[in-house]
C-alpha cells in the first residue's frame, strides 16, 4: 500500500522520458490526458491501490517528479 | 488528507523550479542518488561543499542543490576542490563532473589527486560523449561510433577511467550505471565517509546527444542496455578478457586503506612547528 | 618553537625572499606553486615558513592547478598567493579570469624573465606588462604593482594582499629577475605598524536567498564557504545573487560593467605613482628595475643644470592615465623607458601625446637595463 504523487509541472513526459513507466514492476503508469504547461505529457497512475511502494518510480525519476510514501496496512489486514 | 511531499525536495535551492536536464537524462538519477545518500547519512547539505567543472554534469548541484557550490573552469574542479579541502578540512568536498571534464582536459588533476589520496569524493558522470556542446566524441566514446566530431566513426581506443584512477592510487573506486540507482546511493554513502580519494564512475545515458544522434536509443532503451551489459565484479572475475568485451564491470572495485594527504600534511606541519614526533 | 609571521628587523635580503616575507606579514595562509626560474625562491621560502605559522604550501602538478587551488582556498576565507614567471602566467590566465569573474581575492607574483616562450629564464625582462590586463579573455580590470627594489618586494606584497581583500580581485606583482634576485637592505617593521585589510563577509545567519554577494561597484561582501551562506559561485554570467543567466544581454552587460567599474571607481585609492618632476621640461617615465637607471640619469642631468624629472609608475593597472596626462601637461618632452619593445609605451603615449612630445628609449640590448649615460644622451637630443 502506498501513496503516489506525480508533480506534473516537473515531469518531462512519458514519451520523451518515460523512465517511471519502464521501471514500475507492476506497470501502473499510463499517459495522462492533459499536457503540462511545458508541453510534456506526464503519467498518471492506473491503479494506485495496486502499488507496492517499491519506490522505483521515485528513485529513478531524473526530475524528482514522483514521490512515493509507503503506508502501513490497516489493523487486522493481512500482511 | 494532505499531499505527500518528495523527501528530497527540501534540498533543492528555493528559486529553482525545474532541472535543466533533457528528458530522461541520467544525470538526474545520479543527482537524486547523491541527495538520497546525504539524507540516509543523516547529514545536511551544509556539511558539504560541491565543486564542478564545465558540462551538463556540472549542473547537478549548480544551481539545483541548496548548498555552497563552486562552478569552475573546464577540467579543473578537482584542483579547486583541493584548495577548498585545505581551507575547510571538516567539510565534505564533493566533485560532480563528466568524463570529458575529468579524464580529457582534467586528466592530470584526476591522476595527481588520486595519487595524493586526498579526502574528497569525485562522482564522474560518464556518458561517453561531450553532451553540452552537441555530441562530440570523448575519450570514452566506443571505437567506431559516428559523432558530431567523428562523422566517419571514432578511431581511438577509449579509456577505462576507473582503471586509471585505481592505478593512480585512490583508496575507494566504484563503478555503477544509472540502472543501479540504489547501489549508487550506497557507494556514495561510503565515499562520503571514506578517509581518502573516493571515485565513483556512473555510466549514464545522454538521451539526446548520444542516444538520439548516434542512433543508440531512448533513455529507457539505454538503461535497459546498461542492465544487460552490466556484470558484477565478482562474476566478471570468472570471465576472460575476451568474454568481458562490451560488458560493463560494476561494483566497488577498490576499497582499501592508504595514507591520506591531509593526514600526512598535518604531520608535516607539526614537524615544521617544532613539535616532538 | 613557532616562528613569527613578521620578522621585524633590518636585513640584507633577496627580493624574492622579501616577497615571501611580505606575504607572511600580510597574513597569507595558503600558497601553491610550481617550480620556475626566476621565481622558485619565493615558493621555497613559503614552503619553509608557512608551516611554521600554521599555514600550508603545496607544490602542485602544474601552474593551472596552482592558481585553481589558491582560488578554492580563498573561497574558504584564506589569504592566498602564488608565484611564477611568464610561462606560468600564460598557463594560469583562464583561471585568473575565473577569479576576476567570481571576485576572488588572491595575489599573483610574476617574476618576469626573457621571453617569448622558454626564452632566457635568468634574464630580467619585464615583457609581460600588458598580460595581466589583456591576457585573459574578455573585458576586465585588474590591479598590478611594479616593485623596483627588494624593499618594495616586501611592501608591495603587503599592499597587494590588502588590495585583493579590499577589492575582491586578483592582484599582480610584476617583478623581474633583476628585482627578484638582487639583494639590498630590507627593513621589516613591527607587526603593529603594518596595515592589514580583511575582506568583508555577510553577517552570519543572513537568509541565503537574500545575500547579494557579487557585482557591486563598492565591493559586495564575500559569501565564503562553510558559513551557511549556500553560495552559488559560478563562472557563468550571473547576477548580484550569483544566479546564472545565459540568455539576457542586459545581464551580460551588467556582469561586464560592474566587474570593471568596481576597480575603476576606486582608482584614486589604487593608483600609486612616484612624482619627481617639479619644474622639469623633460620627464622620464618608467617602472620597476629600469626606474633605478632613470633616477640616476635624472640626478646626473640635474647636476648638469638640465630640467629633468621622473615619473615612476608603481601601479601599472588600472592604468594611471590621469597621472600621466597631468604630468604631460607640465612637461615639454616625455621619454618612456622600458626594458622591452614598448609595452606600456602605447598607453602612456595615448595619454601624453596630446600635451608633449613623447618618445621611447629601449636599452641598447633588450635584457640590459638602460645605461644612465645613454639616457642622458637622449635627454640632450630631445632638448635641442
Image (spheres, grey):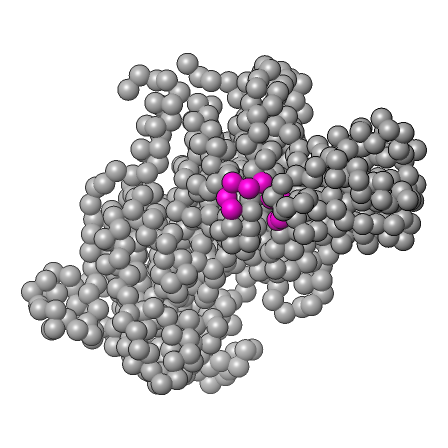
> Where in the figure is residue C147, as x and y percent of width and height?
66, 34
In the picture, residue C109 is in which quadrant? Answer: top right
* Front-lying residue, C326 or B55: C326
* Front-lying residue, C336 or A40: C336
Q: Main secondary structure of the magenta part?
A: loop
> Where in the figure is residue A65, as x and y percent of width and height?
43, 68
Up the image or down, C36 lies above or below A43; here it is above
* Front-lying residue, B110 or C320: C320
The residue depicted at 63 percent of the width and 69 percent of the height is C247
Give the side of residue C300 with respect to residue C164, left or right.
Answer: right
The residue depicted at 25 percent of the width and 77 percent of the height is B225
The residue depicted at 25 percent of the width and 48 percent of the height is B169
The residue depicted at 32 percent of the width and 69 percent of the height is B140
> Where in the figure is residue A58, as x and y percent of width and height?
36, 66
Number of numbered labels in the structure image: 0
Q: Is residue C110 visible?
A: no
Up the image or down, B203 lies above or below C90; here it is below
Which residues are drawn in magenta? C120-129
Quarter holding the N terminus of chain B?
bottom left
> Where in the figure is residue C164, as x and y percent of width and height?
63, 39
Q: Is residue C85 visible?
A: yes
Q: Is residue B222 magenta?
A: no
Quarter holding the C terminus of chain B?
top left
Give the side of residue B131 with respect to residue B173, left or right.
Answer: right
Q: Is residue C128 magenta?
A: yes
Up the image or down, C238 lies above or below C219; here it is below
* Front-lying residue, B87 or C169: C169
Amino acid at each position: 500500500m502506498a501513496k503516489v504523487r506525480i508533480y506534473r509541472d516537473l515531469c518531462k513526459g512519458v514519451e520523451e522520458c518515460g523512465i517511471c513507466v519502464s521501471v514500475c514492476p507492476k506497470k501502473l503508469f499510463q499517459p495522462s490526458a492533459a499536457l503540462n504547461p511545458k508541453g510534456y505529457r506526464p503519467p498518471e497512475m492506473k491503479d494506485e491501490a495496486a502499488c507496492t511502494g517499491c519506490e522505483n518510480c521515485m528513485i529513478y525519476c531524473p526530475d524528482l517528479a514522483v514521490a512515493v510514501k509507503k503506508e502501513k496496512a490497516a489493523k487486522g489486514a493481512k500482511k | 488528507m494532505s499531499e505527500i511531499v518528495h523527501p528530497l525536495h527540501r534540498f533543492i535551492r528555493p528559486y529553482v523550479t525545474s532541472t535543466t536536464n533533457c528528458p530522461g537524462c541520467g544525470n538526474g538519477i545520479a543527482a537524486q542518488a547523491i541527495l538520497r545518500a546525504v539524507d540516509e547519512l543523516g547529514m545536511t547539505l551544509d556539511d558539504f561543499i560541491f565543486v564542478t567543472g564545465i558540462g551538463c554534469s556540472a549542473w547537478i548541484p549548480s544551481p539545483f542543490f541548496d548548498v555552497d557550490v563552486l562552478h569552475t573552469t573546464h577540467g579543473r574542479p578537482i584542483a579547486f576542490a583541493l584548495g577548498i579541502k585545505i581551507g575547510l578540512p571538516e567539510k565534505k568536498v564533493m566533485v560532480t563532473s563528466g568524463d570529458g571534464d575529468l579524464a580529457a582536459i582534467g586528466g592530470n588533476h584526476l591522476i595527481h589527486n588520486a595519487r595524493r589520496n586526498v579526502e574528497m569524493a569525485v562522482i564522474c558522470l560518464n556518458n561517453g560523449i561531450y553532451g553540452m556542446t552537441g555530441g562530440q566524441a570523448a575519450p570514452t566514446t566506443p571505437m567506431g561510433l559516428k559523432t558530431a566530431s567523428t562523422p566517419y566513426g571514432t578511431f581511438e581506443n577509449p579509456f577505462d577511467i576507473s582503471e586509471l584512477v585505481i592505478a593512480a592510487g585512490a583508496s575507494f573506486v566504484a563503478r555503477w550505471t544509472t540502472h543501479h540507482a540504489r547501489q549508487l546511493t550506497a557507494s556514495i554513502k561510503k565515499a562520503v565517509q571514506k578517509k581518502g580519494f573516493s571515485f565513483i564512475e556512473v555510466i549514464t545515458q545522454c538521451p539526446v546527444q548520444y542516444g538520439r544522434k548516434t542512433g543508440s536509443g531512448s533513455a529507457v532503451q539505454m538503461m535497459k542496455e546498461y542492465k544487460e551489459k552490466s556484470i558484477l565484479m565478482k562474476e566478471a572475475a570468472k570471465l576472460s578478457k575476451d568474454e568481458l568485451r562490451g560488458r560493463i564491470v560494476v561494483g566497488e572495485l577498490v576499497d582499501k586503506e592508504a595514507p591520506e594527504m591531509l593526514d600526512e600534511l598535518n604531520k608535516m606541519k607539526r614537524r615544521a612547528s617544532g613539535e616532538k614526533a | 618553537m613557532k616562528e613569527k609571521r613578521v620578522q621585524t628587523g633590518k636585513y640584507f635580503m633577496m627580493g624574492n625572499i622579501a616577497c615571501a616575507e611580505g606575504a607572511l606579514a600580510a597574513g597569507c595562509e595558503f600558497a601553491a606553486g610550481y617550480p620556475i626560474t626566476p621565481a622558485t625562491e619565493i615558493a621555497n621560502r613559503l614552503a619553509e615558513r608557512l608551516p611554521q605559522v600554521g599555514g600550508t604550501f603545496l607544490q602542485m602538478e602544474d601552474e593551472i592547478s596552482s592558481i585553481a587551488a589558491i582560488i578554492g582556498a580563498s573561497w574558504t576565507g584564506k589569504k592566498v598567493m602564488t608565484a611564477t614567471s611568464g610561462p606560468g602566467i600564460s598557463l594560469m590566465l583562464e583561471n585568473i579570469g575565473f577569479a576576476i569573474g567570481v571576485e576572488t581575492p588572491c595575489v599573483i607574483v610574476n617574476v618576469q624573465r626573457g621571453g617569448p616562450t622558454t626564452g632566457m629564464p635568468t634574464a630580467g625582462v619585464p615583457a609581460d606588462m600588458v598580460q595581466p590586463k589583456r591576457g585573459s579573455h574578455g573585458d576586465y580590470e585588474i590591479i598590478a604593482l611594479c616593485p623596483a627594489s627588494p624593499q618594495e618586494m616586501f611592501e608591495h606584497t603587503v599592499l597587494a594582499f590588502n588590495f585583493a581583500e579590499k577589492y575582491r580581485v586578483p592582484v599582480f606583482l610584476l617583478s623581474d629577475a633583476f628585482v627578484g634576485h638582487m639583494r639590498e637592505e630590507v627593513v621589516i617593521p613591527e607587526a603593529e605598524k603594518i596595515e592589514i585589510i580583511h575582506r568583508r563577509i555577510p553577517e552570519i545567519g543572513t537568509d541565503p536567498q537574500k545575500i547579494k554577494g557579487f557585482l557591486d561597484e563598492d565591493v559586495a561582501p564575500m559569501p565564503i564557504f562553510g558559513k551557511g551562506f549556500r553560495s552559488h559561485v559560478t563562472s557563468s554570467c550571473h547576477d548580484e545573487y550569483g544566479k546564472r543567466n545565459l540568455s539576457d544581454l542586459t545581464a551580460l552587460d551588467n556582469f561586464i560593467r560592474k566587474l570593471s567599474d568596481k576597480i575603476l571607481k576606486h582608482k584614486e585609492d589604487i593608483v600609486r605613482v612616484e612624482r619627481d618632476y617639479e619644474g622639469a621640461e623633460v620627464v622620464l617615465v618608467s617602472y620597476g628595475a629600469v626606474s633605478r637607471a632613470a633616477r640616476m640619469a635624472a640626478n646626473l642631468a640635474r647636476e648638469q643644470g638640465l630640467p629633468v624629472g621622473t615619473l615612476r609608475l608603481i601601479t601599472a593597472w588600472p592604468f594611471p592615465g590621469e597621472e600621466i596626462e597631468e604630468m604631460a601637461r607640465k612637461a615639454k618632452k616625455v621619454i618612456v623607458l622600458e626594458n622591452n619593445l614598448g609595452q606600456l609605451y602605447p598607453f602612456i603615449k595615448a595619454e601624453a601625446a596630446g600635451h608633449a612630445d613623447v618618445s621611447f628609449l629601449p636599452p641598447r640590448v633588450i635584457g640590459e637595463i638602460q645605461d644612465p649615460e645613454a639616457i642622458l644622451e637622449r635627454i640632450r637630443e630631445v632638448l635641442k
